[in-house]
Image (cartoon, rainbow, N blue to C red):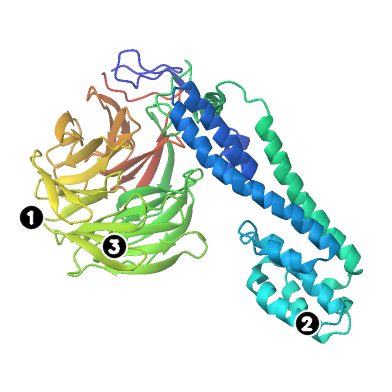
Amino acid sequence: MSGPNSNSLNTSSDAQGTRVHHHRSSEYSRLCTEADATLLDDNNPRIRRDIIRIVAQYLDSQGFTSTKVTLYDEANVKQQRENNYISDVVRLRAAVLDGEWGEVDRICASAYLKDKKHILYSVYKQQYLELIDDNEPQKAFTTLNKHLKPLEAQQSVHGEFRDLCYLLTTKSIQDAPAFRNWDGIASARERLAEYLQSILEFEIVGRESEHQHLRPNRLVTLLRQAVAYQIESCQYHAEAVPLVPSLLSDYAPVVVPNAEQGAFAGHLGNVKCTAYVGPYAQLIASGSSDNTIRIWDTDSAECLATLRGHTSRIWDICVDRAGATLFSASGDGSVKVWDIRDLHKPQCLHTITADDGGDIYSVSLNPLESHIIMAGYDRKIRLYDRVTGRVVQTFHGHDLSVAQAVANPLGNLIISGSKDQTIRFWDMMSGSCVKSLRSHLGEVTSVATSDSGMLLLSSSKDNSNRLWDLRSLKRLCRYKGHQNTSKNFIRSGFVGDSLIVGGSEDGMVYLWDRESTNIVQRLDGHQGIVYDAKWNPKRGILCSASDDWTLKTWWFNPQATTNMAEL
């Protein structure tokens, strides 16, 4: 046996390994990550123009000159439209100040202002108020119905449109609560002109930014800053400066959990499955043979909610990316859809029942989260449309129960593993089986795809987990050492790009090096079969579900002694 010292950790496939230490990211970093949408408004016209300039600079630096020209050509068409819009606002401001309402109507009908509803509402409101002030109720009524009523949603304060209607019955504009401060036509025109001027200044400042100096390699500089932030805010820090291999996913160092972090007790039966809730895994969900799903606080291990409604054991669960909806598959022959946004009052939104009422062993979502994939005892896989509320495709072909069915990352295939010892690939649109693999010598208990979509991992009751190349459908590796032979669904999955994790009947969580197939860690702590173990890169933790009625989370603790197998 050999293991890391307090400052090192062997995790990679080469002999050098990776040295990391645990790091608690600051509360500020967490809040910044969660507030990404508020830090940068990508709908701001100035920001959009900045992005176009930065992308064009990068294209030019890489020799994609014609692509850059095409980008600018398309951007210039939109720029011309925006210039026409500015010209119309200039003319509109002058017409308002002069009270030329015929000209105002012509300008507001232009193609460049017809979608600027906030401007149109403000202008027509001024026109309407002037007609009321001039004691022309019939013309005011026409303006109200023709122009203001369609723009009611643009009212600046609640109840303003109601008060506009009320003005048709009053003696004075000040009689309506929303217009008590009305001080005459001239002052109101000046305030509207100031509002239009502020719009012009915003647009003109945006144009001026286009003449600011653009620093060389601006796009690459911003990407390096983003990666540096990801590394700094990560839970674990590498001692050597890491080389980030891809920009397609957030940076997460490869670590091997070596110590128990938390124990989650409360279920009254074995825990079959687990899933993380929310983009930052603040919560963990679990399904049990006690017929319930529980939702736990990841940090405190406190049970925050218990979902009741199923009449048999929970075989599988999944959660949407937002952490708002949970899906549970049960031995009662149904999949339930739960709203878990309010944990004080979680609600079952819908129940989907299989035709024959047999156990449903697997539930998952397609990449767009528009469809539910469910499979089980009746040997069928069903694709359920969440919008129409019906099964839109049924996949037939397995000879025995289907243990698990998932979509590939592209969303064009469903991959299923069955008790008939086969793995099948189904075309999502036609429902036909396009390929079948028969290599395992026992029932297939789980299937999982890598984030890249290039690899497939399968588990079987032949005491092995197998890795497949999804492009060639060739078997690459076999992972052994654990126990998976009896009537249980032992599942396995990926830990980043470098490790494989799986449960075992001996009560341990096993981690293998993906390329060498060596066991790099055995996590010993459960008192019964480990059915499921899932990794969360945001938190740097594993969560395992066991026959001993508990969940456990595992992390890397530099001071902990490890149960590390020799590579």
Left or right, 48 with reference to 262: right
Gap in angstroms between the C-alphas marked 2 and 3: 51 Å
Cα gap from disc 1 to disc 3, whole angstroms? 22 Å
Under circle 2, the secondary element is helix
Residue at point 33%, 20% (across, down): 12
The residue that appears at 13% across and 48% down in the rendered structure is 434
Instruction: Please tell me the numbered disc located at residue 384.
Output: 3
Q: Earlier in the sequence, mark 2 or mark 1?
A: 2
Nearest the camera: 98 or 82?
Answer: 98
Quarter holding residue 138: bottom right
In the rendered image, the quadrant that contains the C terminus is: top left
Disc 2 from disc 1: Cα separation: 72 Å
Residue 156: image x %, image y %?
73, 65
Contact between labelled residues 1 and 2, with CB atoms less than 8 Å apart: no
Tag 2 residue: 166
Name the amino acid type tagged 2: Tyr
